[in-house]
Image: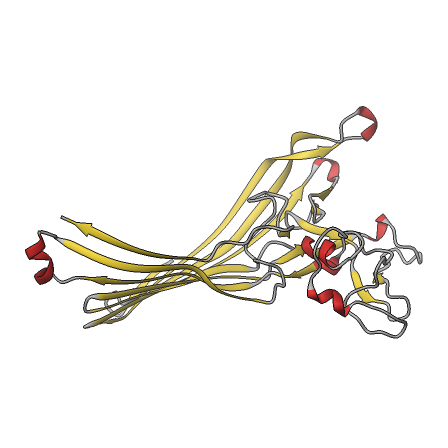
Amino acid sequence: IDLSMLKGRLSFALDGYYYLTEDLLLDRPLPGNIGFTSIADNVGSLENKGLELGIDAVITDGELKWNSNFNISFNQNKILELYNGQPILNVGRGNNAVIEGEAIGVFYQWKSLGVDPSTGDLVFEDVDTNNEINDLDRQVVGNPNPDFTGGFTNNLAYKNFDLSMFFQFTYGNEIFNGVRQYAENMTFGESDNQLASIKQRWRQPGDIAPIPRIEGTFNNDITSHFIEDGSFLRLKNVTLGYNFSDELLAPMGLSNFRLYLTGQNLLTFTKYSGFDPEVNYSGIGSIRRGVDFFTFPLARTITLGAKVSF
């Protein structure tokens, strides 16, 4: 659906889609006694459906020119079918999984209920209620896929100056912070520097603490204790430019001379405690998603440049 009004000063574009992928190529699990644990095979089907909305607006076009663009995308994916319904579990450092009826790459782990004040150990949900925490108690505890993503751009021009600002946002995705598994442990990651949050660890019976005791029973395990909200708003790019007038350029034989100052990744607003909510330790992967393991953050850069035309 495309809509334009106010003589083109305001326009909307709304797209809806449904996409079905069949013969999805995945590593199908094999019995370990044959010497291999998996084989690549066309064993799955995946659906993607969603909405994309874009809004363009000319706010003012006088001496001050101001154009804005806003876009937002909602996407849901779901695994519809796997080989004999068999899930693919424990993929990567965050135990990502491929499970029928779930989004691709969900976190399949023990669900942490917090630190026991009497023992200092992590407590987990006992799914099968047998008073024992084992593999049968693992469940889907998080989703690295966001509810929606988008961006917001403003372009302004006044006389010889121009300014462009681009904001990027993601909401609803979760991150397994593998750094904390080592840097809030003091035993499992004994060779790693520790985070300041380790000072909030459990020390004696009765302590209400967010961090379990040193050498706790489950400290080394991949659990939802390390899963965090990965939503963020980032000032991705800002450019300020100045175009010299023709009167100044003509005597020098120049047709254009522009100076500009650009900044990238200048500000990030997020509740995520790690270095950067936008990174993933394995790059862009289909299953290994939303995992941070000492991943180098996106660099903040400032560039001064000039564009000259003769």
Which x, y percent locates residue 35? 79, 25
Residue 305, located in which quarter of the rendered image?
bottom left
Q: Residue furthest left?
A: 251
Nearest the eye: 310 or 133? 310
Residue, x 75% and y 68% (percent of image)? 199
Nearest the eye: 202 or 21? 202
Residue 225, above or below 309: below
Nearest the eye: 270 or 44? 270
Residue 47, above or below 40: below
Total number of numbered discs in the rendering: 0
Which x, y percent locates residue 20? 55, 42
Residue, x 13% and y 62% (percent of image)? 245
Residue 31, located in which quarter of the rendered image?
top right
Q: What sort of colour scheme is used for the picture?
A: secondary structure
Lateral position of residue 108 relative to residue 289, left or right: right
Residue, x 86% and y 66% (percent of image)? 120
